[in-house]
Amino acid sequence: MNKDLIDKLNAQKQLSLTEWERLISDFSDTDRKYAADMAREISQSVFGKKIFIRGIVEFSNICRNDCLYCGIRRSNAELSRYRLTKEEIISCCKGGHEYGFRTFVLQSGEDAWFTVDRTADIVREIKKLFPDCAVTLSMGEMEREDYARLKAAGADRYLLRHETADKTHYEKLHPSSMSWEHRMKCLRDLKDLGFQTGAGMMIGSPYQTAECLAEDMQFLSEFRPHMIGLGPFIPHKDTPFRDMPSGSYELTLFLLSLCRIMLPEVLLPATTALGTINPKGREEGVLAGANVIMPNLSPLAVRKKYMLYDNKICTGDESAQCRNCLEMRMRSIGYEISVSRGDFGGTYK
Ligand code: SAM
Ligand code: FES
């Protein structure tokens, strides 16, 4: 029973590397439920029983990178590629605004067509048309001055998972053309420029050890992101990791709870990947301390092409259906969807 370590995390908001490793590698169902109850109580004390929704627009599946785990990696020749036009992106936001979304997350592969100028133009247009909304970008690594220009154009938030805080592990998940140092620098730049910044990692990615996750938790406790994206790794049939096992559902839920206990005010989504490995994943994620859900606003015609991993859910439903489905799912566990922007309201920068 690791109740003492969970209590210690709650009291001190940090643990040593060895304590993290012990907690992560040896936890019982009782520990997990103990952490979930504590995390849920913390989440409700900060956010009430309200869940923020963010509409994701997956605007391009073209990517110059070749992350070994990712279904839209450059080397996947099986995939039919698409890129939405500015008008299509705006039309997704318009629909989303009518369904009550006040945050749009624009996500893509690293597609060179979307230069800083073109992206900034789209951001400005969205902010002009929907001044009551926040714009989140999630389009990968750039240089500091590029991020600065996107911030100046009105982008409010940026999601860039660090993927792993362990450099050796990073190098097993990415080709040598990609650099762990650069990804970490991007995160520091984003935060420094005033973006509400999201980091995060996959749980159970190939070659991940309890030590890697311990380093991730220490990194998150020091970096203090405003958002943390945590989801299980799920293999994709057209990637080198096709035969690797999916990450553990229980471990993902446990780590969500530990993140909530460690950073009470952090914005913590119950991810689509969690809902993919278990039909009740998003509900149980919320009950384990998550407070954000990110339904899909992409046009139905492209949904199946943004397949990061096999069997991704919500690829066959219209945006309005997704919104209603989530509302019902949240009601079934006693929660309500909040139609506010859902900014980070915490005490750290
Ligand atoms: N290009 C941007 C970037 O690199 O941050 C955003 C898109 S990228 C596809 C978004 C996230 O999807 C990644 O940070 C990664 O953690 C997650 N992802 C990719 N492949 C996955 C897989 N097989 N299983 C679970 N999550 C995956
Ligand atoms: Fe580029 Fe996944 S490899 S988004």
Image (tube, helix red, strand yellow):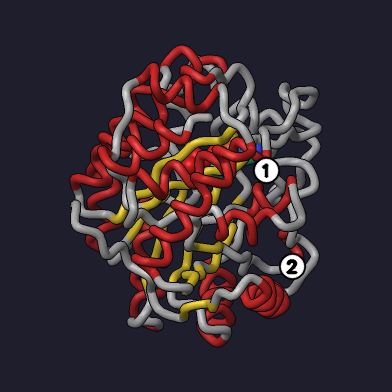
Please provide percent x and percent y for residue 284.
Answer: 63, 56
Q: Residue furthest bottom?
A: 98
Judge by depth and name the residue closer to the eye, 95 or 51: 51
- Which residue is at 34% across, 80% downward? 128
Q: Residue 313 versus residue 212: which sits nearer the camera? A: 212
Residue located beneath label 2 in the image: 300
Disc 1: CA contacts within 10 A as few (<14), some (14-19) or many (>=20)? many
Indicate which disc residue 308 carries: 1
Quick check: 206 left or right of 37? right
Instruction: Find out if the beta carbon at label 1 lies less than 8 Å from the nearest ligand 1 atom.
Output: yes
Q: CA distance from mark 1 to mark 2?
A: 16 Å
**Reading the chain from its start, which is encountered first: label 1 or label 2?**
2
Q: Is there any visible trace of residue 263 in the rendered image?
A: yes
> Splitting the image into 4 quarters, where does residue 220 fall?
top left
Mark 1 vs mark 2: give the one in front.
1
Residue 251 location (% of width, % of height): 60, 36
Residue at image location 52% in from the left, 45% down from the top: 34
